[in-house]
Image (cartoon, helix red, strand yellow):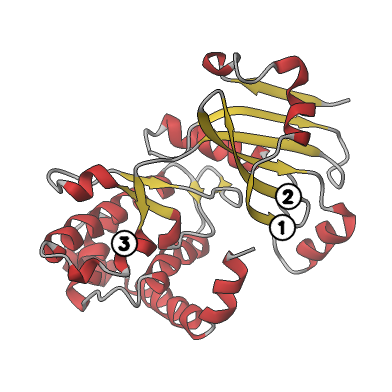
Amino acid sequence: MNKKLWVDPDCRNRFTPNTIFEDMQTVEGEVYRTGKGRVTLRFTRNGDSFFLKRHTGIGWFEIFKDLLQGRLPIIGAMNEWRALERLQIMNISSLLPVAFGQRGMNPATQESFLVTRELTGTVSLEDLVKSWQERKDFIHIKRALIPQVARMARRIHACGMNHRDMYICHIHVSQRWLDNPVSYPELFIIDLHRAQIRQSVPQRWLVKDIASLHFSSMDAGLTRNDRLRFMRAYRSMKLGQTLEIDKEFWADVQHRAERLYAKRPELVQEKSH
């Protein structure tokens, strides 16, 4: 049997390598999300909280359906595991993995899991923007976050990775920074199970990620100048330069974001599964 296994040495008092596959198949906790052949749940172990993403195989029907629809099927936890490894190398904050396992050669029935520490002391940008205009320091918070989100997106793309679901609900900011917003805000990117890693990211996937950010922040009270700040920081060049050099790119981003916004009820339902 083809088998891969890794357990953080600091967590081997909580997860025993010899029995961890069976342990992760039976562990119980608070279910956060379910999908075809996978479940995400929160559980505690020795006083610490963790999240488990457990994959049990999606079957050949779902694999072929995704391929025929031009989508890359997600058949296990390996994809997110590799994405988290890449982010750690690039010093981009995300979930902290503590255990990963995969067994079976048949992609339709392959079993795998990924355990990460619970992300605490953060707020998703989606939750933040619902009431951030009520803050006295709203303008400062907004102007600090926008270029930092842009820089994080640029760094993710520069290392050959695209998220595929880069909505603001998947970006968290430190509550500690929100309580005392000095210096640069600390951001965390999560939900990387659909991320792709290559030598370099094709243009259409760059457009998809940035359009997802644009679309999901359309109701956040951002101004045209805020959008321009993002564009300048994402391209790391003067505004006039990116508006001239990347004219088609930004037009594609705007067009795709508007299309996403037009069908937002459907997308909200999709994100909930």
Please, is residue 207 above or below residue 19 in the view? below
**Which label sits on residue 188?**
none
Residue situated in front as seen by the camera: 248 or 122? 122
Provide the residue designation for mark 2: 38
Question: For this view, does 126 lie left or right of residue 117?
Answer: left
Provide the residue designation for mark 3: 128
- The CA distance from mark 2 to mark 1 is 5 Å
Q: In the image, residue 273 lies at what x, y percent?
A: 64, 63
Please, is residue 117 above or below residue 121 in the view? above
Which residue is depicted at the point 70% across and 62% down? 71
Q: Element under label 2?
A: strand
Amino acid type, residue under disc 2 in the picture: Arg
- The CA distance from mark 3 to mark 1 is 27 Å
Quarter-of-image position of residue 253: bottom left
Question: For this view, does 195 lie left or right of residue 63?
Answer: left
Residue situated in front as seen by the camera: 240 or 73? 73
Provide the residue designation for mark 1: 35
Q: In the image, residue 209 lies at what x, y percent?
A: 46, 61
Question: For this view, does 159 lie left or right of residue 192?
Answer: left
Precedes in sequence: disc 3 or disc 1 = 1
Amino acid type, residue under disc 3 in the picture: Leu
